[in-house]
Image (spheres, rainbow, N blue to C red):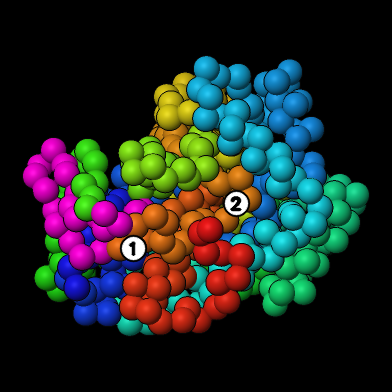
């Protein structure tokens, strides 16, 4: 079957890979000059089932309200003339209830854990260098009260199979001696030894190369204008470089998926939430991070990619605006420099901002809507790298008529 995959981020490329493994003729369309040029480029690079908690929690409404007055909040809401923001925000608030947050977190963890297992299968099969580290991820807290709350929260994931280890300050420093100079600021942490990290852009580009080597087509620099249909079938994708016919189509355009779906009369509540990241060269600094970590107080994530440090933070409701200025990175840079004063060449940090494709319940869309050959694989939010491989395998299974390896109860589009 000829299948056209719309979108060249990590979700689209992993989907094309799984479909090609199933024997399909795949064509992937990406508007940028190379794949993994947007959200898949600048994220924290964490394969983190241990970070599966949904944003739509009972605490979220107050955090958003505070952000209207306190400018240094990690979660920032801005008033906008975009009516889609308010429609999406209402749906988000409807998910911010304890029972729903618990259910959605467990669904998200199910998908994340499965996806990590699929990634390991791919890594075992393919030779791909992507600065992988399988040392786990540390989620640390700055007070006893915060650590106790974090442990109580993490027990939910532990009940679903997540391995956790609770560490005191000495245990944190033993795990990563580079944190010794910041030890007094850290009370303790929760260590997830089975979590891992790796550069998603390097991985995605290497995987795309394998797809083309095996006869697939990766059409970069190609902008999708619309999908043409006949009855309940999508017939072709119209782009600025011509048309692409297919027997099936996969929508994997991240934050832009809702815009294309709107043209087909499909309403997908996916809204772009801007995130910021710094990529810091280590240079000759003697004490860079040796393990990925999340400062749960400041909501700053820190990963090591070989000779670089990736730092991410902030979630801003800013529409499709990806502009940024140095002040936007001040908090995350200050936090990282305080934790690892001899960790990197902070004056040479590369600044970046991108868009997370967020759904109200933080769960991606799978399956078909309205058209019998248009499949959704989109809306992966802030851990798309974590969920991409499982999502790709699930999509390939659905197209093949196979039953996915995990229950899709609660995950299929309605």
Residue bearing the label numbered 2: 362
Residue bearing the label numbered 1: 372
In the image, farthest residue toward the right: 145
Could you say which is closer to the camera, residue 97 or residue 59?
97
The quarter of the displayed image where residue 280 is located = top left
Q: Is residue 320 left or right of residue 147?
A: left
Q: Work out whether residue 278 can be spotted.
A: no
In the image, farthest residue toward the left: 242
Q: Is residue 228 left or right of residue 284?
A: left
Could you say which is closer to the camera, residue 189 or residue 362?
362
* Pointer 1 local density, CA inside 10 Å: few below 14, some 14–19, many at least 20: some
Mark 1: secondary structure: loop
Name which residue lies at 58% across and 76% down: 407
Name which residue lies at 63% across and 55% down: 293
Segment tinted magenta in the rendering: 231-252
Task: Give residue 182's position: percent from left, percent from top.
Answer: 72, 46
Answer above or below: position of 165 versus 54: below
Mark 2: secondary structure: loop
Name which residue lies at 55% across and 19% down: 80
Answer above or below: position of 311 versus 6: above
């Amino acid at each position: 079957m000829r299948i056209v995959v719309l979108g060249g981020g990590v979700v689209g490329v992993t989907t094309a890979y799984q479909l090609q493994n199933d024997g399909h003729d795949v064509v992937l369309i990406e508007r940028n000059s190379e794949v993994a040029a947007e959200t898949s480029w600048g994220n924290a690079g964490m394969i983190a089932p241990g970070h599966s908690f949904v944003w739509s929690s009972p605490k979220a409404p107050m955090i958003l309200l505070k952000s209207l007055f306190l400018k240094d909040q990690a979660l920032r809401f801005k008033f906008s003339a975009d009516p889609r923001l308010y429609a999406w925000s209402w749906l988000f608030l409807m998910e911010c209830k304890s029972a729903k947050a618990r259910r959605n977190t467990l669904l998200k963890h199910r998908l994340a854990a499965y996806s990590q297992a699929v990634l390991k299968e791919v890594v075992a099969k393919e030779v791909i260098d992507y600065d992988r580290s399988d040392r786990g991820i540390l989620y640390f807290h700055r007070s006893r009260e915060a650590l106790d709350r974090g442990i109580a929260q993490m027990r939910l994931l532990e009940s679903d199979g997540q391995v956790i280890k609770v560490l005191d300050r000495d245990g944190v420093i033993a795990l990563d001696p580079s944190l010794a100079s910041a030890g007094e600021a850290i009370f303790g942490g929760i260590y997830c030894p089975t979590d891992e990290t790796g550069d998603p852009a390097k991985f995605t580009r290497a995987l795309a190369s394998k797809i083309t080597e095996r006869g697939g087509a990766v059409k970069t620099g190609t902008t999708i204008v619309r999908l043409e249909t006949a009855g309940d079938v999508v017939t072709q994708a119209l782009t600025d470089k011509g048309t692409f016919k297919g027997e099936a189509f996969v929508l994997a355009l991240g934050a832009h998926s809702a815009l294309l779906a709107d043209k087909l009369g499909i309403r997908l509540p996916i809204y772009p939430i801007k995130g910021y990241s710094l990529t810091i060269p280590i240079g000759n600094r003697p004490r860079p991070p040796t393990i990925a970590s999340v400062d749960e107080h400041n909501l700053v994530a820190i990963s090591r990619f070989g000779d670089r440090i990736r730092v991410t933070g902030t979630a801003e409701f800013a529409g499709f605006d990806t502009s940024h200025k140095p002040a936007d990175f001040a908090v995350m840079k200050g936090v990282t420099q305080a934790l690892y004063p001899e960790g990197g060449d902070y004056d040479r940090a590369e600044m970046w901002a991108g868009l997370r494709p967020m759904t109200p319940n933080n769960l991606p869309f799978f399956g078909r809507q309205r058209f019998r050959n248009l499949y959704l694989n989109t809306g992966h939010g802030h851990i798309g790298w974590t969920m991409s491989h499982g999502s790709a395998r699930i999509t390939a299974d659905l197209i093949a008529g196979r039953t996915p390896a995990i229950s899709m109860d609660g995950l299929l589009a309605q």
